[in-house]
Image (tube, grey):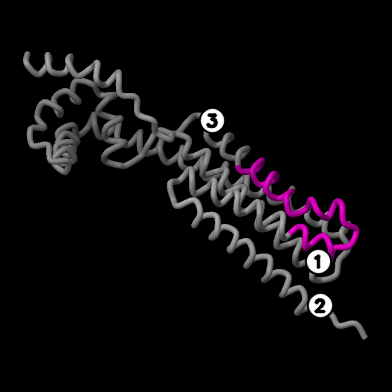
Amino acid sequence: MADLDRTRNQLPLIQQHKEKHFTAGEIVRDIIIGVSDGLTVPFALAAGLSGANASSSIVLTAGIAEVAAGAISMGLGGYLAAKSEADQYKKELRREEEEIVLVPDTEAAEVAEILSQYGIDEYGPVVNSLRKNPQAWLDFMMRFELGLEKPEPKRAIQSALTIAISYILGGLIPLIPYMFFPKASEAVVASVVLTLVALLVFGYAKGYFTDNKPVMSAVQTAFIGAIASAAAFGMAKLVQPRQP
């Protein structure tokens, strides 16, 4: 009775304390995947073609084609990955359902073992409560034994669209200068500046949302993009046939 009264007294405290947690981790992860690849791959391609003395129109045409193909490929990859996670969850869910019915004592012992890892010695009441609620028991085993969270029903489609759109938005940035500068040698300079600024902003935002030192994240992201484009530009210059 005392425990019940104590719990009731704590409810107002819980209601007053509003915790602010970031809950859009999967969406942010998809955006990071799409934008980072979108900024880097077309950037390197444009720099490489510019190093091979291609015209701005050729660089722009090849870049747009790459962005379209990359968006489809990345989106499909995101869809298949999310679909595989959902299929794996359903498979493990069916297995746990069967085990709860066929070997309930073994599953109860597993609950006790999991609780003991958290320092809970008096786990009998918890085990008995879960026995009376099979759905809660199943959810507990999926989360704490297998470490699996129930995926959102539309997760696969959302992941595919988020990654694809992010890739397109990121991929168009390095190509913008080629729309205004006829000479690729001039456009590539503007593309480098524009893309490095975008990489710095994106890297900072990525670090901010992931609590991972925004300034350091910005520098690392820009550095990786610069290395990729420099490698592509240098390789194009290296293999370019010399004019007689």
Q: Residue at x 56, y 57 (%)?
A: 221
Pick out the residue farthest to the right: 244
Q: Residue at x 90, y 82 (%)?
A: 243
Give the left or right position of residue 53, taking residue 135 as reference. right
Three-letter amino acid code at disc 3?
Answer: Lys
Please tell me which of labels 2 and 1 falls first in the chain. 1
Mark 3 vs mark 2, CA separation in Å? 47 Å
The secondary element bearing badge 3 is classed as: loop
Residue 227 image-quadrant placement: bottom right
Give 232 or 217, whichever is nearer the viewer: 217
Give 98 or 61, whichever is nearer the viewer: 61
Q: Which residue is mark 2?
A: 240
| Position of 199 relative to 149 (above/below) | below
Three-letter amino acid code at disc 1?
Answer: Ser
Q: Which residue is mark 3?
A: 154
Residue 232 image-quadrant placement: bottom right
Q: Which residue is mark 1?
A: 50
Question: Callout 2 environment at 10 Å: few (<14), some (14 to 19), or many (20+)?
Answer: few
Residue 27: image location, x then y, percent: 52, 38
Please tell me which of labels 1 and 3 falls first in the chain. 1
The secondary element bearing badge 2 is classed as: loop
Q: Nearer the viewer, mark 1 or mark 3?
A: 1
Q: Main secondary structure of the magenta part?
A: helix
Residue 137: image location, x then y, percent: 25, 28
Start and end of the magenta stretch? 163-191
Q: Residue at x 48, y 43 (%)?
A: 209
Give the left or right position of residue 117, taking residue 70 as reference. left
Residue 167 covered by magenta stretch: yes
Residue 100: image location, x then y, percent: 24, 31
